Image (cartoon, rainbow, N blue to C red):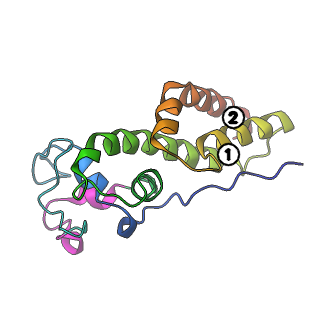
């Protein structure tokens, strides 16, 4: 019997990130955000140490969308694993590559969260083996690098995850 792949933490650790969600994501002024912010531009509330200057009062300041957002750990993984602790402020040339890596790892971590939930289902041996393969592919034992993420993004993993999840209807 094979052992289940060990997954990375699927929770945000903002102290280990370089404020990627506060830079990479765009948001529109409305009930979730008090202002318009284009993608790849730092939020005006992002402090020099990558913390949020208004974190303790997000709702009152008009940013409840920030409180509800969760990158599922993709931000710290990009910062610490893929870019080895570099940040876009000290190394501005990394911003485009960090943006690409963040977009890819957000999707990967969303898929990992769904696949991890499938572990609790009474799956057939074949489905369990497929689940283990999908989990391992989305979480390589030697970690992620920029080239590995780019290759992964070119593949069909997302489509295979979607097919696998649709196939679980009989198990739910």
Q: Are marks 1 and 2 in contact (CB under 8 Å)?
A: yes
Residue at the limit of the structure toward the bottom, as seen here: 56
Report if residue 150 lies within the magenta region: no
- Residue linked to disc 2: 168
- Residue linked to disc 1: 118
- Looking at the image, is mark 1 or mark 2 earlier in the sequence? 1
Left or right placement of residue 70 versus residue 158 in this view: left
Report if residue 64 lies within the magenta region: yes
Is 104 located above or below residue 91 in the figure? Answer: above
Residue under the point 63% across and 34% down: 165
Q: Which residues are magenta?
A: 53-69
Nearest the viewer among 82 and 31 is 82
Q: What percent of the width, then of the height, locates residue 4?
A: 76, 52
Q: What percent of the width, then of the height, locates residue 123?
A: 79, 41
Left or right placement of residue 70 versus residue 92 in this view: right
Q: What percent of the width, then of the height, locates residue 37?
A: 13, 46
The local crowd at label 1, few if under 14, some if 14 to 19, many if 20 or more residues have their Cα within 10 Å, is some
Q: What percent of the width, then of the height, locates residue 131?
A: 71, 39
């Amino acid at each position: 019997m094979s052992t289940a792949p060990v997954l990375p933490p699927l929770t945000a650790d903002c102290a280990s990130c370089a404020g990627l969600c506060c830079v990479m994501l765009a948001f529109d002024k409305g009930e979730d955000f008090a202002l318009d912010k284009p993608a790849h531009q730092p939020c005006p509330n992002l402090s020099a140490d990558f913390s949020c200057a208004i974190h303790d009062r997000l709702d009152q300041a008009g940013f409840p969308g920030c409180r509800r957002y969760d990158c599922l750990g993709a931000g710290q993984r990009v910062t610490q694993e893929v870019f080895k602790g570099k940040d876009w402020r000290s190394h501005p040339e990394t911003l485009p590559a960090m943006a690409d890596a963040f977009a890819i790892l957000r999707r990967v971590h969303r898929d990992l969260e769904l696949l991890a939930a499938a572990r609790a289902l009474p799956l057939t041996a074949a489905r369990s083996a497929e689940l283990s393969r999908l989990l391992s592919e989305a979480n390589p034992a030697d970690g992620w690098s920029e080239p590995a993420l780019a290759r992964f993004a070119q593949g069909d993993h997302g489509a295979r995850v979607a097919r696998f999840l649709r196939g679980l209807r009989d198990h739910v």
